[in-house]
């Protein structure tokens, strides 16, 4: 059985060689292994180290991207180059011990399409943990994610689901969204999560917001439905308010209706309309980028 280990690399020069060495040391006794490194236009000397690894190990494929596309795009690139019976996705920060891939693969071999990792304790920065919890709650509703399933970046995917995932050609992929719309055969197992050995997380607030927007816009129309329901409620409220104002005016012709209430109503509903138009603009913009053929990635060099 062959396992493809897919690693999106970004500013991981201090950890990537140790990670790849340990992957081969831990997995080679159990499986045929290939490692696919996708350098997402790192700012450090990752490129040199990854090239050295590709020259040293025949089982390492190295792809260097021309610009920074983001983690999910880099993972999609790696999945397109994977040839294993299972694809294991692991970050380059060494917080997930490579030996834990064995647990995920063995769970998948029981007939499960995708196996996510879950943790008794996460060693991320508190800001990253808050973002993960928020992402978890939102994905429960937007993506109909099973409650209790943690969408970890460390996971193993059966090759049949990999084939379904890589059919998606939009410029802003969201791997977990693609998985959830492809299968219900999902499981999870507890694994250890170590403290970050080097540097700090590459996930900034801007990148987290971009990820949430991809989840919102690309994989659900529920935000549009929220505003549709809100519009119906506002219409009903406006109708009854109008009836009340007319009755008050009939009963008391000298009554001066309040300027404040009018201005508040105008400002409130104008704000709602602007937000709604912005949301529609996001959907239209994403569709335009996809129809315009915006790439998920562009390759600078590859060593395969």
Image: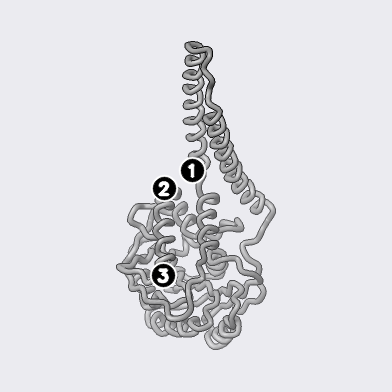
Seen at 60% across and 66% down, the residue is 69
Residue hosting label 2: 141
Task: Please name which of the two marks, 1 or 3, marks the residue nearer to the observer.
Answer: 3
Image position of 104 with respect to 271: above or below? below
Instruction: Evaluate if marks 3 and 2 touch, with contact meaning CB atoms under 8 Å apart.
Output: no
The answer to which of marks 3 and 2 sits earlier in the sequence is 3
Rendered location of residue 24, percent (x, y) = 44, 83
Q: Which residue is mark 3?
A: 125
* Near-viewer residue (286 or 250): 250
The one nearer the camera, 67 or 115, is 67
Residue at the image position 50 percent from the left and 26 percent from the top = 238
Label 1: element kind: helix
Asked if residue 85 shows in the view, the reply is: no
Cα separation between marks 3 and 2: 25 Å
The residue pinned by badge 1 equals 222
The answer to whether residue 68 is left or right of residue 86 is right
Mark closer to the chain start, 1 or 3? 3
Q: Quadrant of the N terminus?
A: bottom left
The residue depicted at 56 percent of the width and 73 percent of the height is 38
Say how many tags the image has. Answer: 3
| Label 2 secondary element | helix
Q: Position of residue 184 (x, y in %)?
A: 39, 53
Front position in the image: 294 or 132: 132
Mark 2 neighbour class, 10 Å CA radius: few under 14, some 14 to 19, many 20 or more: few
Relative horizontal placement of residue 118, taking residue 12 as reference (left or right): left
Callout 2 touching callout 1 (CB < 8 Å): yes
């Amino acid at each position: 059985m062959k396992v493809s280990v897919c690693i999106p690399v970004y500013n991981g020069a201090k950890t990537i060689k140790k990670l790849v060495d340990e992957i081969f040391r831990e997995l080679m006794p159990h499986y045929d292994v290939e490692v696919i490194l996708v350098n997402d236009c790192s700012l450090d000397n990752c490129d040199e180290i990854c090239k050295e690894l590709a020259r040293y190990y025949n089982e390492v494929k190295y792809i260097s991207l021309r610009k920074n596309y983001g983690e999910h795009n880099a993972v999609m690139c790696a999945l397109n180059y994977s040839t294993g019976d299972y694809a294991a996705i692991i970050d380059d920060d060494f917080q997930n011990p490579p030996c834990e891939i064995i647990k995920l693969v063995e769970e998948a071999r029981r007939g499960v399409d995708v196996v996510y990792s879950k943790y008794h304790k996460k060693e991320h920065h508190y800001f990253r943990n808050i973002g993960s919890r928020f992402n978890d709650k939102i994905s429960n509703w937007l993506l109909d994610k099973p409650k209790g399933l943690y969408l970890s970046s460390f996971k193993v995917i059966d090759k049949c689901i990999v084939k379904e995932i890589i059919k998606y050609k939009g410029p802003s992929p969201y791997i977990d969204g693609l998985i959830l719309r492809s299968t219900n055969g999902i499981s999870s197992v507890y694994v250890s999560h170590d403290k970050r050995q080097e540097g700090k997380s590459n996930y900034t607030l801007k990148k987290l917001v971009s990820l949430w927007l991809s989840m919102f816009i690309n994989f659900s129309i529920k935000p549009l439905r929220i505003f549709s329901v809100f519009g119906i409620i506002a219409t009903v409220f406006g109708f009854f308010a109008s009836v009340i104002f007319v009755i008050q005016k009939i009963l008391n012709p000298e009554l001066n209706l309040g300027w404040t209430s009018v201005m508040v109503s105008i400002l409130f509903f104008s704000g709602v309309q602007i937000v709604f138009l912005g949301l529609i603009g996001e959907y239209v913009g994403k569709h335009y980028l996809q129809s315009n053929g915006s790439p998920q990635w562009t390759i600078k060099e590859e060593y395969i």
